Amino acid sequence: MRIVMAFLKKIRGNTFYMPGKANVGIFVGEKGRCALIDSGLDDYVGKNVLQLAHQYGWQLEGIINTHGHADHCGGNSYLQNKIQLPVYATAPEAALMENPELEPYYLYSAAPIKELQIRFLKAKPSRVAAVIDEGPFEISGAVFEILSLKGHSPGHAGVVTPDDVCFLGDAVCPKAVLEK
């Protein structure tokens, strides 16, 4: 399969990503069956994912979220509403995705001030179809390895594709981001 798009980058084998402030991982399995790793910040990213899938004839079959911060799960709601795409996440992250008002609470430790009630910190709610745990997880006819990366968020997970590409969410960030 040859894919040439300015906003789609091949990593290895059938593993790609859409660059952005929070990258969206895409694994294309047999017969164009796809799994997403994260869904980006908002509906706009979700629309781009659908457009891409339509362009290549891919069948989106689910989203594995690394964690429940809005910039990684903000496109979930849009994709669920448009194509009933199932979402998979660890139990603590599922709670955040289904109840996004909790994210500003745990960042601020009280009823959040108005400045913390923004789309970057509060995604639209999304339903989690199944809770995933550390270990193998099958979707799109492929087996992914789920890693526990607790720290950045309570149930943060890494997702390793069958091509041995690991999506880390925000488990690693540049020094400049830490200093900011």
Image (cartoon, rainbow, N blue to C red):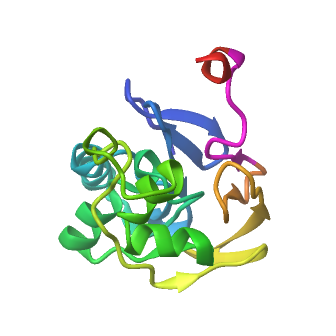
Q: Main secondary structure of the magenta part?
A: loop
For the C terminus, which image quadrant? top right
Q: 53 or 124, which lies in front?
A: 124
Give x and y (percent) for residue 150. Answer: 75, 58
Residue 98's image quarter? bottom left
Residue 62's image quarter? bottom left
Q: 91 or 33, which lies in front?
A: 91
* Residue 61 visible in the displayed image: no
- Residue 166 appears left or right of 51: right
Q: 66 or 152, which lies in front?
A: 152
Residue 161 magenta: no
Magenta-highlighted residues: 165-175
Residue 167 magenta: yes
Q: Is residue 81 above or below residue 73?
A: below
Seen at 57% across and 35% down, the residue is 10
Give x and y (percent) for residue 107. Answer: 51, 49
Residue 27's image quarter? bottom right
- Residue 47 appears left or right of 163: left
